[in-house]
Image (cartoon, rainbow, N blue to C red):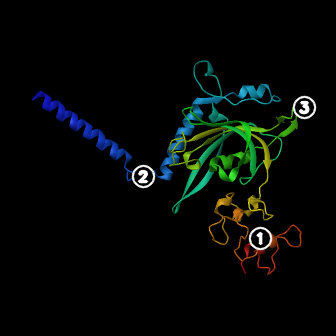
Amino acid sequence: MMTYNKNLNYFFFTLLILLYACKKDDPDQVEEIRDLSEQTSADNSALIEYLETHFYNYEDFENNPDKYPIDIKLDTIADDNNNKIPLINQVTKKTIELINGNDIVNADLYYLVSRQGKGNRPSVADSTFVTYRGNLLNGLKFDEKVYPVWFDLISVVRGFREVLPEFSDGTFSIRADGTFDFKDYGQGIFFIPSSLGYFSNNTGSIPAYSPLIFSVSLYLVNQSDHDLDGILSIDEDVNKDNNPLNDDTDNDGIYNLFDSDDDGDGILTSNEYDQNEDGIPDDSDNDGIPDYLDSD
């Protein structure tokens, strides 16, 4: 009798494990995407809490204004750091409007300028030469580039794309050994809600709905013309909302900055834009619509 009970218990225990495993791996078990407005509000609360309880090594920058590089370091305000200035007193807030069905959701991101930079500012559509470190609010580092890389801002998360134009690039010289010496470049920290990051997507070691922190240095800026039509990509932002990824004049599914024929009339944009080379887009029929955006 005892042997029967043990075997029976083992059978049911094994069955429960199998059922749980099958349920966990069931592709039909999809988590419902959270409400954008509610998640944005929750992210903002988490970001504010972080900003109120953390600081960065601002004294290193204040005491060494001509020293390059200086690494940005974040830490908790506690114990020996109790007298440090919290991030919340040093950041600037920027609000981005997001479309959520028929509603508008205001997503707040925050950025801190440790060095403004003395050169050119990028647009949201330009290519930038940067180093960066990405962290979650719990301190986990999910990505880092210690050597500069070119970033096409169109291809990064929107929060990063929206903040980097607040900074300027710097200058460089070439050392005798062929390496580059960068100075006077912008440096800062971005604090981004998940709605301007990866939102409901699990990406690498970044869980869904994670606010993001980026510590960034901006070395160089290169103006971009993605479709090589002679129009800078930022100037293909027809509705002037600072987001070239919602402009598609001919509704062909290709954003203008990637479309070599913006109005879909069969004539390349480069052959319609400014044929008399006076610096003003041509408007042959004087209807107020430039030829390269006018299908008739």
Q: Is residue 113 visible?
A: no
Q: Is the C-beta separation of discs 1 and 3 under 8 Å?
A: no
- What's the mark number on residue 32? 2
- First in sequence, mark 1 or 3: give its number: 3
Q: Quadrant of the C terminus?
A: bottom right
Q: Is residue 93 shown above or below 257?
A: above
Crowdedness near tag 1: few (<14), some (14–19) or many (≥20) residues, C-alpha within 10 Å: many
Identify the residue at horizontal 79%, vertical 50% (top origin): 222
Left or right: where 105 falls relative to 292: left
Crowdedness near tag 2: few (<14), some (14–19) or many (≥20) residues, C-alpha within 10 Å: few
What is the distance, in whole Å, between disc 1 and disc 2 at their CAs?
43 Å
Dot 2 lies on which element? loop
Q: Is the C-beta separation of discs 2 and 3 under 8 Å?
A: no
Dot 3 lies on which element? loop
Q: Quadrant of residue 74?
A: top right
The amino acid type found where label 2 is placed reads Glu
Residue 187 percent across, percent down from the top left: 74, 37
What is the distance, in whole Å, between disc 1 and disc 3 at their CAs?
45 Å
Residue 283 percent across, percent down from the top left: 80, 76
Q: Which residue is mark 1?
A: 269
Q: Is the C-beta separation of discs 1 and 2 under 8 Å?
A: no
Residue 95 percent across, percent down from the top left: 62, 50
Q: Is residue 280 shown above or below 56?
A: below
- Is residue 237 or residue 81 the one in the foreground? 237
- First in sequence, mark 1 or 2: give its number: 2
Q: Nearer the viewer, mark 1 or mark 2?
A: 1
Q: Quadrant of the N terminus?
A: top left
The amino acid type found where label 3 is placed reads Ala
- First in sequence, mark 2 or 3: give its number: 2
Q: Which residue is mark 3?
A: 176
Q: Nearer the viewer, mark 2 or mark 3?
A: 3
Crowdedness near tag 3: few (<14), some (14–19) or many (≥20) residues, C-alpha within 10 Å: few
